[in-house]
Amino acid sequence: MPERRVNLVGRAATANVPRITLGGLRLAVLDLEQTANFMIEMVFPQRRVDRPLYLTSANGEVLARCSTEPMTDRLFRAADLINADGQPLVTASRFRSKTRLPERVATTDLFHLVARKAQAAGLTFYMLGADEAENAAAVASVREQYPDLKIVGRCHGFLRGEALRAKVAEIDALAPDYLWVALGVPYEQAFVEEFTPALSNVGVIKTSGGLFNFLSGSRARAPRWMQHAGLEWAWRIWLEPRRLFWRYLTTNPRALYLLLNRNRSADIGGTHDR
């Protein structure tokens, strides 16, 4: 079947990336610099595959949701590469795995690293997600910080139906090297599943969660000490208690259980099975 053939091509592109199973998901054993370099290498013509590479990120909440939501679990296992975007995952790897995750690969940090490298290499971005005001502010901020970075287009994340399909066709015609999709879990992963076949001219799709809120400046990141201590979730609860208190109350204990019990030593390539 064509879809299976394309999937194997994408898996082959990441086959040599070491991974460990932590909390039930297979995570790339790459640091920020290595991840950014991988993303840069994958968009050059000789490395391109016949559909976009799909990169996503996992934290404790994602581990918990994948263990209880079959659809979310399936969407994450379809990714070509999953980065550990959560300090508790990095800490757990030091005690529960023979191979350690080198560091947290936070999408907000990764974006800036890739932007600097893409600017130098003449590579292109498209930024999809958030509401119109947030999206516009995020893109304006990026253009100010990286004046030579080629952003070929942007759009908010609230299109549906025929308008969304037309926008996807427009994105494919623009052929960005990187499509940053910030729609939140699991909507951005569902977007990738549905529209990857229509985005053959895109190099890499990176799901991005709340990235645009940080780029726009509407949301502040936790202090460095809280990030390193694995307490960024507490900072986020303090900023948005009504939205996040119950979410973390229900997912954090489940994530801790998974990090203590669903782990496996390092391997190369293979499937995303538990």
Image (tube, rainbow, N blue to C red):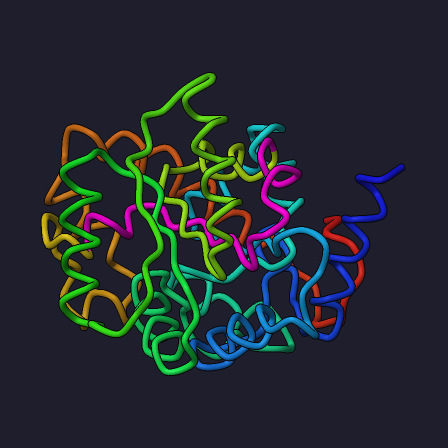
Q: Nearer the viewer, residue 170 or 60?
A: 170
* In the displayed structure image, the side of residue 12 where residue 20 appears, left or right: left
Q: Position of residue 209 (x, y in %)?
A: 35, 46
Q: Which residues are magenta?
A: 194-214
Q: Position of residue 250 (x, y in %)?
A: 37, 33
The part of the image, by quadrant, that contains residue 111 is: bottom left
The part of the image, by quadrant, that contains residue 134 is: top left
* In the displayed structure image, the side of residue 83 where residue 212 appears, left or right: left
Q: Nearer the viewer, residue 153 or 86?
A: 153
**Outermost residue, right direction?**
1
Does residue 71 show up? Answer: yes
Vertical comparison of 122 with 209: above or below? below
Does residue 94 show up? Answer: no
The residue lying at 61 percent from left, 56 percent from top is 53
The residue lying at 65 percent from left, 45 percent from top is 77
Number of numbered tags placed on the structure image: 0
Q: Nearer the viewer, residue 138 or 110?
A: 138
* In the displayed structure image, the side of residue 5 where residue 222 appears, left or right: left
Quadrant where the N terminus sits is: top right
Residue 211 belongs to the span the image colors magenta? yes
Vertical comparison of 151 with 123: above or below? above
Vertical comparison of 44 with 127: above or below? below
The residue lying at 81 percent from left, 54 percent from top is 8
**Outermost residue, front direction?**
173
